[in-house]
């Protein structure tokens, strides 16, 4: 017996609404293996929406800064899970900070829990809803870069690791973990760093676990209590702003 047309159509719609998590996880795995399939995958509803908002990615006004004479800050978000919204909050905390708007943010790198490394330009305006953010991330992992509309500049791009090859020589790489035995006051810690040294902050963007200490120079804790990645970053930015008198 053939089912009524209305019931059949309803089930098809429900299937389309439940695509997000499976497709994001699949694309991450394909991109990590640099398979050809991920580069030629058909557009999904999220990817189409991402294409509609790419023009919104550029636009954060940043004060020009002479990078040859002034040191800056670099953030590395480690083990980020792109199928949850937490990494988006951490990225927004960095891009919205006065540190970035004053021109002192040198770079922002994100390495996913699948091992994919990508760069986010400091002036990018990241979508603030989970739906649009996940669409942008999906498009990035499929096409390996997102270019500003009408321009050749790549606002986000997947890059080859290790991340250390992109860091300046005169830099101090600082990792964070609640389990570290070195508890510090972030303002005092940053203030003690020489002014001619670039600060590289490595923050874990995962819900549980800790970052690897393989390439950090120092491993610290900044609170007696576990902190979210976004709140940890806000404390770091506040300390840097005080050091450089960014109001």
Image (cartoon, rainbow, N blue to C red):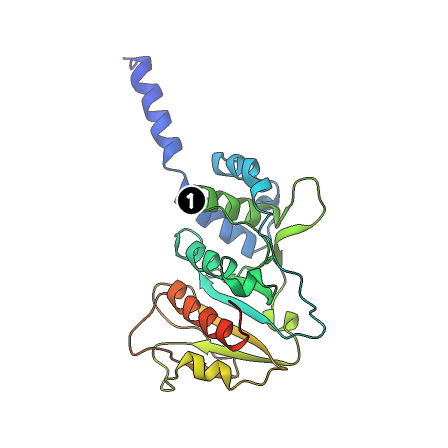
Residue 76 x, y percent position in the rendering: 52, 67
Q: Residue at x 50, y 53 (%)?
A: 29
Indicate the secondary structure of the residue bearing disc 1: loop
Residue 207: image quadrant is bottom left
Q: Count all numbered tags in the image, as a single digit.
A: 1
Residue 222: image quadrant is bottom left
Residue 215 visible in rendering: no
Where is mark 1, residue-wise? 129
In the image, residue 126 above or below residue 176: above
194 and 55: which is toward the camera: 194
In the image, residue 68 above or below residue 131: below
Q: Residue at x 53, y 68 (%)?
A: 75
Q: Residue at x 65, y 45 (%)?
A: 148
Residue 128 x, y percent position in the rendering: 45, 47
Q: Along the horizontal axis of the image, is 42 left or right of 180?
A: right
Residue 8 visible in rendering: yes
217 and 124: which is toward the camera: 124
Mark 1 neighbour density, 10 Å: few (under 14) some (14–19) many (20 or more): few
Q: Residue at x 60, y 82 (%)?
A: 195
131 and 56: which is toward the camera: 56
Residue 122 x, y percent position in the rendering: 59, 58
48 and 103: which is toward the camera: 103
In the image, residue 68 above or below residue 32: below
Which image quarter holds the N terminus?
Answer: top left
Q: Along the horizontal axis of the image, is 41 left or right of 93?
A: right
Q: Along the horizontal axis of the image, is 158 left or right of 113?
A: right
């Amino acid at each position: 017996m053939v089912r009524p047309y209305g019931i059949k159509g309803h089930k098809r719609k429900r299937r389309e609404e439940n695509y997000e998590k499976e497709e994001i996880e699949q694309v991450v795995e394909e991109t990590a293996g640099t398979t050809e399939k991920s580069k030629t995958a058909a557009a999904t509803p999220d990817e189409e929406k991402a294409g509609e908002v790419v023009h919104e990615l550029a636009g954060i006004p940043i004060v020009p800064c002479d990078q040859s004479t002034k040191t800056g800050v670099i953030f590395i978000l480690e083990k980020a899970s792109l199928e949850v919204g937490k990494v988006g909050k951490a990225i927004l905390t960095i891009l919205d900070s006065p540190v970035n708007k004053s021109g002192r943010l040198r770079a922002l790198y994100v390495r996913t829990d699948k091992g994919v490394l990508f760069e986010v330009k400091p002036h990018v305006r990241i979508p603030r809803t989970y739906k649009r953010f996940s669409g942008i991330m999906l498009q990035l992992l499929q096409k390996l870069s997102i270019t500003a509309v009408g321009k050749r500049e790549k606002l986000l791009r997947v890059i080859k690791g290790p991340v250390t090859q992109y860091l300046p020589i005169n830099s101090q790489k600082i990792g964070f973990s609640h389990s570290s035995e070195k508890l510090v006051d972030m303002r005092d810690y940053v203030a003690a760093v020489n002014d001619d040294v670039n600060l590289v902050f490595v923050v874990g963007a995962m819900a549980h676990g800790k970052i690897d200490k393989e390439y950090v120079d120092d491993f610290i804790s900044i609170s007696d209590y576990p902190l979210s990645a976004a709140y940890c970053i806000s404390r770091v930015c506040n300390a840097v702003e005080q050091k450089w008198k960014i109001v």
